[in-house]
Image: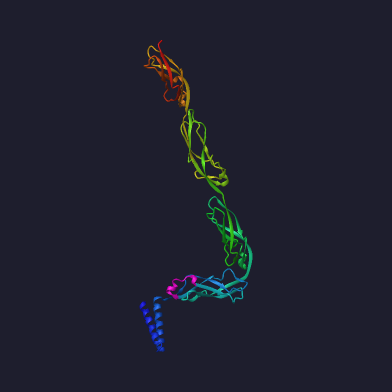
Amino acid sequence: MQGWLGGVVQALRQVALTFRDNWGLALLSLVLAISLWIFVTDRDDPERTARFSSAIPVECVNVPVGKAVALSCSEPESVTVRVRAPESVFDRLTADDFRASADLSEVTTDEATVTVRVESTESRVEIVDVTPNQITVRLENVTSRSVPVRTRLVGTPPRGFEAEEMTLDPEEAVVTGPESLVGRVAAVEADVNLTNRRTAFDETLLLQARDELGGNIQGVNVEPESVSLHGEIRQLEISAAVIVRPDVQGLPADGFSVTAIQTDPPFVFVTGPAEVVQSIDLIGGVTTAAVSIDGSSVDVVRPVVLQLPQGVTVNQPRVTVRVVIAPTQSAFTYNVGLTAVNVPDGLTPSLDQAVVRITVSGLLTVLAGIDAGSLAAMVDLDGLAAGVHVLPVEVQAPSGVSIDAYTPIETAVTLSLP
């Protein structure tokens, strides 16, 4: 293509040089150059004639004073066009590159057939034909009336929240348009999106004229076009973590006692109306169904349900209660007589303390079978000579019994000859 362009430029230069001397030759050269340019351009970017794929909406202009177009501008409301344009231009055309209009300035009746005129903002586009090229227009008297402003709720707040009163300003709007359309308007509505709303909010929303069934009505004007809205959101439910309190009833078998009470999990999350959840004692928690340990001598493990107030739900409806039961431990104190053992031959002992006070502990079932006679307290005199000696006190208890304390832990012993 550059070779052709170079030829065109050279030809134009030749025309300029000879233009002064030979007008006829100059004019012929100019015509040849232009023809050559057209030939080259048409070969690289040929023209295309075809029907444009998108429909072009028709706009009614110069509508008579006091009149309005009924329902829609026409039947049909749009037209299609067949155009001619260079290939490169045709490929990038959109509906926005065209304007279809019907001039109603000469219309004097309520129904008329008018010609549709289509223009393109692209200078290299030629309109070949319009389908249909005429439309029927129906006119009505323009009227206005006041209608209430309402809200239409779209979406829902999160679980546990509820939309309350919506305050609108203004509360009425004026719709203007053809009588048949204005008569169908039941209200103008603002669409309020409640999705994920948790708190009060303020918005400015566009108004849309709608009929009794909630359908949009096109072709009327709404004044004002928007409304100021204040919306309140109320929290219906709240959640809180509360302790699980087991309800253990009964007594274990004789000689056994409860050493621990465990729950799994130890706390749960409850959800419900705010006033109900707030009435739950968060320290005392929620109780379980009753778990009986009556007569048990081993651990009691039970899956049980929770006792919840009306309207409250919980993330885990069942918990496990474990009651640990073990033999009962106890302690007793006895006064035991102190005796001397391994007394040397030929000597007589004399003890400063005659009684030792001994405290023992163990299973209650074992302790129940012993008395002071089951215990022993002694001093060992083996290998001692006559005289006064301070000696440790030794105590003994049956198997299964622990000696917790005793007093005295030592005593003076006098060994003398008879």
**How many discs mark residues in the rendered view?**
0
| The quarter of the displayed image where residue 76 is located | bottom right
Farthest residue to the front: give it. 387
Q: Is residue 191 magenta?
A: no
Farthest residue to the top: give it. 418
Who's the residue at 55% across and 51% down the image?
A: 161
- Residue 131 position in % (x across, y down): 51, 74
- Residue 2 position in % (x across, y down): 36, 77
- Residue 328 position in % (x across, y down): 47, 29
Q: Is residue 90 magenta?
A: yes
Would residue 226 be seen by someone viewing this image from the given angle?
Answer: yes
> Which quarter of the image is occupied by the C terminus?
top left
Q: Is residue 191 left or right of residue 343?
A: right
> Which quarter of the image is occupied by the N terminus?
bottom left
Q: Is residue 223 left or right of residue 258?
A: right
Q: Is residue 25 above or below residue 354?
A: below
- Residue 185 position in % (x across, y down): 61, 63
Q: Nearer the viewer, residue 377 or 193?
A: 377
Q: Nearer the viewer, residue 188 or 350?
A: 350
Would residue 213 be seen by someone viewing this image from the given angle?
Answer: no
Colour logic: rainbow
| The quarter of the displayed image where residue 41 is located | bottom left
Who's the residue at 51% across and 40% down the image?
A: 244
Q: Is residue 241 above or below residue 248?
A: below
Q: Is residue 220 left or right of residue 376?
A: right
| The quarter of the displayed image where residue 391 is located | top left
Q: Is residue 258 above or below residue 151?
A: above
The magenta region covers 85-97
Who's the residue at 37% across and 82% down the image?
A: 10
